[in-house]
Image: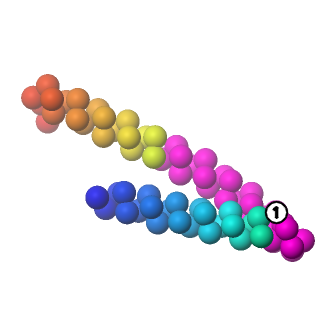
Amino acid sequence: MKKIFVFLLALLAVITTLYTGLNGLMQDHSYGTFFTFIGAITTVGLGLDVVSHLKVEIRRNTLRKLGRR
């Protein structure tokens, strides 16, 4: 449960960063490109973390079904 909460907080941070970057781009501020880039790269990293977490959980559940821990 704690890991899911951390993922949700990271997702909130990414959404905020992307919103700030896109808003900055629309209003022609200098920070718009930077925040958009950082938000996009962080989105990729967060996606890789979520996929990795799901693979580990699926592997654990499969081992539990086989009677091993």
Q: Residues within 10 Å of mark 1 (few under 14, many from 20)?
A: some
* 68 relative position to 52: left or right: left
How many numbered dots are placed on residues in this image?
1
Magenta-highlighted stretch: main secondary structure? helix
Task: Identify the magenta region.
Answer: 24-49
Q: Residue 54's quadrant in the figure? A: top left
Q: Quadrant of residue 3?
A: bottom left
> Residue at coordinates 52% horizontally, 43% vertically from top-left?
48
Q: Is residue 30 visible?
A: no
The structure residue drawn at horizontal position 30% and vertical position 40%, both measured from the top left corner, is 57
* Residue 43 percent location from the top left of the image: 60, 52
Q: Which residue is mark 1?
A: 33
> Left of 19 or right of it: where is 44?
left
Residue that appears at 39% across and 44% down: 53
State which quarter of the image contains the C terminus: top left
Image coordinates for residue 64, horizontal then vertical, percent: 15, 33
